[in-house]
Image (cartoon, rainbow, N blue to C red):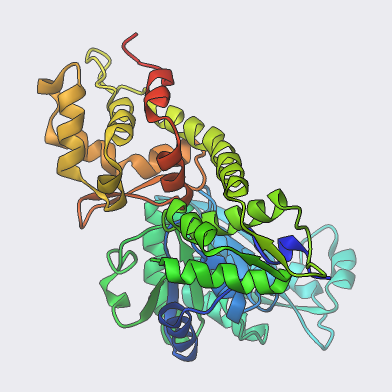
């Protein structure tokens, strides 16, 4: 019997209401057939993982989840471990920090290899030699893509590497990986990168040589026709029918987010007592059940988003010049976002617009320099990482000089929340 959670809702597992979109799914399939590295990007909860897992089951790939603390070597270690390769390393200091040197990879072999000579001088030579009968050793450098590829081939692997949450990595790590991706592409080691951002050519900005060597797949935008197709496909799986009036309103309320659509459909079913496939076809026509679903989902998102806004407003509070009074720009940034009309936010907020609003409300507007605004916006990613806001709400596109919302549920939250009440409750640093 088909369960509700198998049909609707946000899940890492594929749901039965998944629909194929030619522009997105077709592009991804074409990219898989090419020799290019693949970048899948878009706001959070917009179907990146669902797209990849539809055509490449994660169990058949080498999937690595990135974190703000991940270094390039950490990512490569994770890849090698998933290949069953044991890594023994020594560390030396360099200008860039700890560098893995004299690294030895212990690779499983079909034939026994006696490793005593390799570990000569150890107090446990005999014991270790016994343990290593089924391994052979290869020296390698964790910082060299060529060495990583050689180990990959030694392990007889042809799997794709999936890097999830690429946006969590620091700019320096992203830049290094952008250079390594070119080498891997030439060697034939394929990567699929999933990231939360909206602008094209994100990695090409780090390394122009990636031009024509990567395939970029944006999962946005979604339109209402596609949302309705998702709803109707899922409804057939559950043997239910949702009225056109409810479907149209649900699409409008979701603000372009497939994640919100999926969650509202799940809650709508729960409100109507649908937990699994119905024996007799059931019709959903009561608008009140959608009202309840919207209220419940708004409450669900509210605590996380309000807390995130409060944390951003507090900023880092680390004034470099102790004699200079802080400008508290993160606070004014949050107030500016909450004060804007919805259409402006949907289109992406130009830097000039955010600067105008901040200056119009600031207690020392004449002290604000363009460089202050530039630093505020360029450090948004770092601030959100420091505050552990995951996924992040905002991203600054330097090339377009635009602030984008990259958590798709935030639009839904902004539409349904009381923004005035939130502004009143955010701690004013001047009080």
Image coordinates for residue 227, horizontal then vertical, percent: 49, 66
Where is residue 51 shown, x and y percent of the image?
A: 54, 73
Task: Decide if residue 289 is on the left or right side of residue 222.
Answer: right
> In the shown orientation, is residue 322 left or right of residue 243?
left
Horizontal and vertical percent position of residue 303: 55, 33
Examine the rendering and report whether any part of residue 156 can be seen: yes
The answer to whether residue 83 is left or right of residue 27 is: right
Residue 263 sits in quarter: bottom right
Q: Is residue 163 above or below residue 339?
A: below
User: Can you tell which quarter of the image residue 6 is in?
Assistant: bottom right
Residue lying furthest bottom in this view? 33
Residue in the picture at 31% in, 62% down: 199
Q: Quadrant of the N terminus?
A: bottom right
**In this rendering, does residue 101 appear at all?**
no
Name the foreground residue: 174 vs 381: 381
Residue lying farthest left? 366
Compared to residue 358, the image places residue 224 above or below, namely below
**Nearer to us in this view, 73 or 4:** 4
Q: Considering the image in quadrants, where does the C terminus appear?
A: top left
Q: Residue at x 47, y 53 (%)?
A: 254
Q: Which one is nearer the viewer's eye here, 168 or 335?
A: 335
| Residue 385 x/y as whole percent | 46, 41
Q: Residue at x 40, y 59 (%)?
A: 174
Number of numbered discs on residues: 0
Q: Which residue is more in the foreground, 143 or 124?
A: 143
Q: Who's the residue at 74% across and 69% down the image?
A: 281
Residue 304 figure quarter:
top right
């Amino acid at each position: 019997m088909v369960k509700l959670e198998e049909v609707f809702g946000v899940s890492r597992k594929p749901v039965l209401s998944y629909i194929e979109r030619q522009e997105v799914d077709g592009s991804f399939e074409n990219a898989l057939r090419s020799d290019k590295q693949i970048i899948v990007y878009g706001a959070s909860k917009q179907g990146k993982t669902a797209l990849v897992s539809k055509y490449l089951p994660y169990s058949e790939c080498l999937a690595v989840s990135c974190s703000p603390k991940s270094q390039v070597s950490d990512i490569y270690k994770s890849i090698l471990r998933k290949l069953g390769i044991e890594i023994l390393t020594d560390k030396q200091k360099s200008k860039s920090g700890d560098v893995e040197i004299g690294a030895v990879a212990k690779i499983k072999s079909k034939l026994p290899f006696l490793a005593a000579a390799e570990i000569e001088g150890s107090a446990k030579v005999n014991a270790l030699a016994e343990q290593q009968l089924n391994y052979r050793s290869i020296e390698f450098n964790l910082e060299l893509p060529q060495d990583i590829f050689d180990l990959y081939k030694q392990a007889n692997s042809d799997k794709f590497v999936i890097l999830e949450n690429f946006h969590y990595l620091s700019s320096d790590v992203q830049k290094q990986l952008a250079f390594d991706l070119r080498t891997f592409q030439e060697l034939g080691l394929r990567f699929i990168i999933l990231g939360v951002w909206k602008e094209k050519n994100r990695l090409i900005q780090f390394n122009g040589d990636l031009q024509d060597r990567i395939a970029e797949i944006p999962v946005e935008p979604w339109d209402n026709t596609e949302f309705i197709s998702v709803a109707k496909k899922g409804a057939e799986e559950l043997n239910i029918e949702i009225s056109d009036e409810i479907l149209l309103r649900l699409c409008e309320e979701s603000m372009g987010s497939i994640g919100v659509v999926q969650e509202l459909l799940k809650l709508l079913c729960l409100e109507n007592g649908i937990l699994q496939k119905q024996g007799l076809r059931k019709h959903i026509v009561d608008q009140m059940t959608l009202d309840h679903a919207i209220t419940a989902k708004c409450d669900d998102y509210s605590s996380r988003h309000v807390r995130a806004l409060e944390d951003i407003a507090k900023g880092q509070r680390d004034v470099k010049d102790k004699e200079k009074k802080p400008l508290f720009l993160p606070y004014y940034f949050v107030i500016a976002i909450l004060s804007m009309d919805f259409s402006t936010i949907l289109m992406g907020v130009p830097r000039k617009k955010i600067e105008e609003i901040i200056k119009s409300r600031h207690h020392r507007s004449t002290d604000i320099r363009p460089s202050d605004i530039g630093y505020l916006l360029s450090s948004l990613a770092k601030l959100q990482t420091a505050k552990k806001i995951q996924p992040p709400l905002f991203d600054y596109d330097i090339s377009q000089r635009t602030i984008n919302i990259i958590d798709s549920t935030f639009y839904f939250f902004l539409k349904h929340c009381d923004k005035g009440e939130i502004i009143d409750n955010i701690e004013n640093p001047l009080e």
